[in-house]
Image: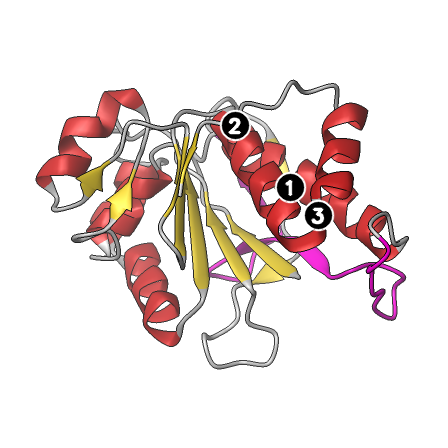
Amino acid sequence: MNVDILLYDGFDELDGIGPYEVFDYALGYAAEGSDGDGEADDDGRAGRVRYVTLDEREAVTASHGTRVGVDGTLPDPDADASPDLLVVPGGGWSARDEDASAWAEARKGDVPRALAAHHAAGTRIASVCTGSMLLAEAGVTDGRRAVTHASAIEELRESGAEVVDARVVDDGDLLSAGGVTSGIDLALYVVEREFGAGVADRVATVVEYERRYEVAA
């Protein structure tokens, strides 16, 4: 499974870094065959997880000031390197930060256009926190079951999404998680679906995270 996490200036650290760590552990454990069915790639892992941006750059600055290195740019939807799962973090939406935030990216339009293109091409997309609002701006959540951070729930509903009261919502090719730490639950849910409960439980144990199973599927 290849996972790309789409970063931009002002994204919330935990929205992106939490799922990254879960997937990083899981892709290593799955390759070891924790459930007896791991298949390793040339790097001895069951896929890749990367931080990507739309434009070429070395790093982005997150909402609390952390500088995060970038692994590459998001491939075109029809490219061989296109991800199996594209994760979209939120950050700064309700503060309406016009310079560095999910709100700023929604106004610029480049991220929503990229998300719409990947959705149309069949890429499975997962949002964390107000990353759902970027999907809403792209029209991806229209008529779809989804959730976002509590501060943006009414905006998500007004955008045309069917808001579900759950920590994680699985609507097929569209996954969404509520506020901040729920991204860890979303990632563990995906890991269990892809690689089995053994791998997911092992990851939860190593990061000392008590899983919350509030998933609306």
The residue mark sitting in front, 1 or 2, is 2
Task: Specify which label sits upstream in the sequence, 2 or 3.
Answer: 3
Q: Using the image as rendered, state which of residue 189 and residue 151 is in the foreground.
A: 189
**Quadrant assignment for the C terminus:** top left
The residue mark sitting in front, 1 or 3, is 3
Residue 198 lies left or right of residue 36; in this view the side is left
Q: Is residue 48 magenta?
A: yes
How far apart are the two marked residues, 1 and 2, measured between alpha carbons? 19 Å
Q: Which residues are magenta?
A: 36-62
Residue in the image at 35% along x and 51% along y: 171
Q: Secondary structure at mark 1?
A: helix
Residue 33 lies left or right of residue 190; in this view the side is right
Q: Using the image as rendered, state which of residue 55 and residue 208 is in the foreground.
A: 208
Residues under numbered marks 2 and 3 in contact, where contact means CB atoms less than 8 Å apart: no
Task: Specify which label sits upstream in the sequence, 1 or 3.
Answer: 1
Residue in the image at 45% along x and 35% along y: 11
Q: Secondary structure at mark 2?
A: loop
Q: Is residue 189 above or below residue 95?
A: below
- The residue that label 1 is drawn on is 20
Image position, residue 148 (x, y; %): 31, 32
Image position, residue 18 (x, y; %): 61, 32
Can the viewer see residue 95? no
- Within 10 Å of disc 2 (Cα), the crowding (few <14, some 14-19, many 20+) is few
Q: Which amino acid type is marked by label 1?
A: Tyr
- The residue that label 3 is drawn on is 196
Q: Is residue 116 magenta?
A: no
Image position, residue 3 (x, y; %): 61, 56
- The residue that label 2 is drawn on is 213
